[in-house]
Amino acid sequence: MHSGTRSILITAPTGSGKTMLSAHMLKTAASRNMPAWFIVHRRELIKQSIRAFNDVNVPHGIVASNFMEAKRLPIQIASVQTLIRRLKRYREPKLIIYDECHHCAAGSWKKIMQAFPNAYSIGLTATPQRLDGTGLGNFFQKIVHGPSVSWLIENGFLAPYRIYAPPHVSTDGLHSRMGDFMKEELNALVDRPTITGDAIKHYRRLCEGKRAVVFCVSIKHSQHVVEQFNAAGIPAAHVDGETNIEERDRAIRRFEAGEIRVLSNVELFGEGFDLPAMEAVIMLRPTQSLGMYLQQAGRVLRPSPGKHEAIILDHAGNCERHGLPDEERNWELTMDKCTKKSNGDNISVKVCPSCFAAQFSGKPECGYCGYTFPIQSREIEQKEGELVEVDPATLRRNRMQSQGRCKTLESLIAEGTRRKMKRPHLWAKYVFNARQAKLVRG
């Protein structure tokens, strides 16, 4: 901050101790009587933050419904939904720490930032990008990188994992909205008894008896999944953001105790759900968002006594779409899309046809079951057939017509992907910006 920088983004994986880091920073602020806020967006994160702050003896107040206020204390743990209605009740902060700061573009977060432009800002997240893949350069000046997922696993701070990707439904033909698949179309695609039945079959084969969290598309989808797990004799429960607070807490306690083996949810446990005893994750929600995928996969990587490894059952094809959870990625403030350090945009994952284990490509054998992958011949395969001359002008006209039908940046990216471009998003952005400039010039 001495360099004149007033806003910093700290990126580190799920389970790397970002909340505890914040508690230590705010303990220093409290010793100087500096007003400072730690802002979260879910009730579960309020409780977890209270435990972390108590562990390092940070006196604090709580700004959230159903909690008694302690406005005289300089440090406040605040729910963003409650804080936005009570801004004038508290001393103006000199430091604000935003947990899960990839939400900063949302209305309430942005209003708080704008209300206190002179406060120092620190953002915390495992995935420093918005849902559409763009960076957070509009909100923070510098980015600080924490340890990688692979380093944390190698040094025992996160659990090793096995990831399986059984045959999944194709998302070809689905439309996108705001950077992700449209929920209505997704729900019609995945809310089928055959898909859930496949999930139950692989749960029994790969993680029988383990506590698993399921990520679903919609409330009805989650409820249907729970019905089928219970019918199969596997104790399961559903929770979502609209579930009664007492009922939600009771379900989590039963899950922790092992009375419930499967806890299905909709957009509730993707961020901040701290339950190290969780042993498996079942993905039934395809997503185009790298951030959402990594947040969901990261839930199960926290270590716990007796937990030798985590199991990820990816029925949604997300690992083939985005890569493995511990791949090295280049996070930047001004990025359009996150790229991997190793090989650009190419997803280097292959799935074993014998056991469905997903792993880095390039290995001659499956690291899970020992299956020997066939060697792909580099010779050109010759087939009988009549060669047809391609008219370059016709080909060029067809491509321009196809490009012209793409009205949004997302559809241009999809067109570039269909053409097998190495970096379709860069081409799409160039075309889109050229169109906008042409409109401005009139």
Image: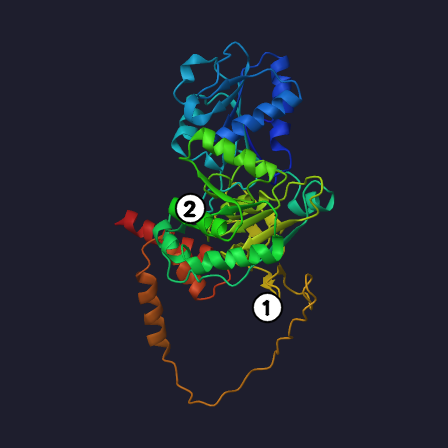
Q: Does the residue at mark 1 contact the one at mark 2 (Cβ under 8 Å)? A: no
Image location (x, y in percent) of residue 84? 40, 23
Q: Image quadrant of residue 258?
A: top right
Q: Image quadrant of residue 18?
A: top right
The residue lying furthest to the left in this view is 442
Image location (x, y in percent) of residue 197? 48, 58
> Residue drawn at (60%, 58%), measured in percent from left and top?
205
Query: From the viewer's perspective, is 79 left or right of 211?
Result: left
Q: Nearer the viewer, mark 1 or mark 2?
A: 2
Q: Nearer the viewer, residue 40 or 146?
A: 40
Mark on residue 37? none
Instruction: Determine the CA span between mark 1 and mark 2.
Output: 31 Å
Q: Nearer the viewer, residue 256 or 155?
A: 256
Image location (x, y in percent) of residue 286? 46, 53
Q: Image quadrant of residue 3?
A: top right
The residue carrying mark 1 is: 353
Image location (x, y in percent) of residue 195? 46, 59
Q: Is residue 65 visible?
A: yes
User: Does 370 sit above or below residue 45?
Assistant: below
> Residue drawn at (61%, 25%), measured in percent from left and top?
51
Q: Amino acid at mark 2?
A: Gln
Instruction: Give the secondary structure at mark 2.
Output: helix
The residue lying furthest to the right in this view is 155
The residue carrying mark 2 is: 223
Q: Amino acid at mark 1?
A: Pro
The residue lying furthest to the top in this view is 72
Instruction: Give the secondary structure at mark 1.
Output: loop
Quarter holding the N terminus is: top right
Q: Is residue 2 visible?
A: no
Q: How many residues crowd mark 1 within 10 Å: few (<14), some (14–19), many (20+)?
A: some
